[in-house]
Amino acid sequence: MPLSGLTDYHVHTPLCRHAQGWPLEFARRATELGLAELGFADHNPMHEPFDDWRMLREELPQYIAAVQDARAAFPDLPIRLGLEMDYLDGSEPWWETLQTLGPWDFWIGSVHYLPGGVEVDNPKYLSRYRDEDPELIWSAYWKQYERCIRSGWFDFVGHPDLPKKFGYRPKGDLRRFYAPCVQALVDTGLAYEVNTAGLRKDCRELYPAHGFVALAREAGVPVLINSDAHAVEELGAGFGEAVRLLREVGYSEVVRFEGRRRVAVALPEVEL
Ligand code: ZN
Ligand code: FE
Ligand code: FE
Ligand code: ZN
């Protein structure tokens, strides 16, 4: 079993309108790969229709039912129910409600939108990187990311380092961006994910970069590995590289979630 002992908690469904594969299909693939647990984290519904890449509020029951169908079909595979939450100012009243609308195992805090509305990972805003100093977007992003961590709403944070997606990075030592967020993770006791989707983008690198992971390890910040799969073939993709990076910087544990409680398990000794 290639991925035995590992988990993949960042998986999308067709309800977000840009992913393929229903929970049943992902669950079948997860058992083929030998994953210890599977988790769904589709883009969270907003209170009002908001953009064209997430489920509507009315579709939430369908999302939960699809995950429950997969659980029924694969009773030996623990399947966790989560959401990838967009950290947006002023959402708290809706989150209060959303918390009560499902038996959540975890919420991921992600920053895709900067204050002002720029979408960090949308090619629509590519000129912001190309024609301006990437430093501007990076500064705004990491400031917002720190606020996301400190908000206290999430179990772990998603794809740190997202603004490198298109391959534009500021000059110099990027640890100046990472360090305040690692400190925020220490202060709040939150975990972060190593997200392998970056390997499939122009930056050709895990989210976050080696420098962030090394700082976080030194500070004792818990970690988990996720694929951000938007298609069944992407489940568990790049996990070999992620495991090697975690070992290299000295991690010996990864974390899992159930009912919004975190447990640490040994980083499995898989050959990848
Ligand atoms: Zn997505
Ligand atoms: Fe995301
Ligand atoms: Fe995602
Ligand atoms: Zn994501």
Image: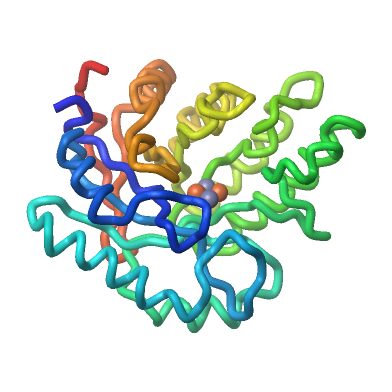
User: Residue 212 is drawn in which quadrant?
Assistant: top right
Q: Quadrant of the N terminus?
A: top left
Does residue 83 appear to the left or right of 118 in the view shown?
A: left
As drawn, is 13 to the left or to the right of 134? left
For the point 58% across and 54% down, the residue is 149
Residue at 12%, 59% in the rendered image: 73
> In the image, residue 18 lies at what x, y percent?
52, 52
Q: Give residue 124's position: percent from left, percent from top.
A: 77, 45
* Number of numbered discs: 0
Q: Residue 82, position in %: x, y?
A: 38, 61
Q: Residue at x 37, y 40 (%)?
A: 224
In the image, residue 19 above or below residue 266: below
Image quarter where the C terminus lies is: top left
Against 271, residue 62 (above or below) is below
Position of residue 54 in the picture relative to residue 125 (left or right): left
Residue 101 visible in image:
yes
Extreme residue toward the left, this view: 76
Spot occupied by residue 185 in the image (x, y as percentages of width and height): 54, 47
Q: Nearer the viewer, residue 53 or 149?
A: 53
Q: Is residue 157 visible?
A: no
Q: Nearer the viewer, residue 121 or 114?
A: 121
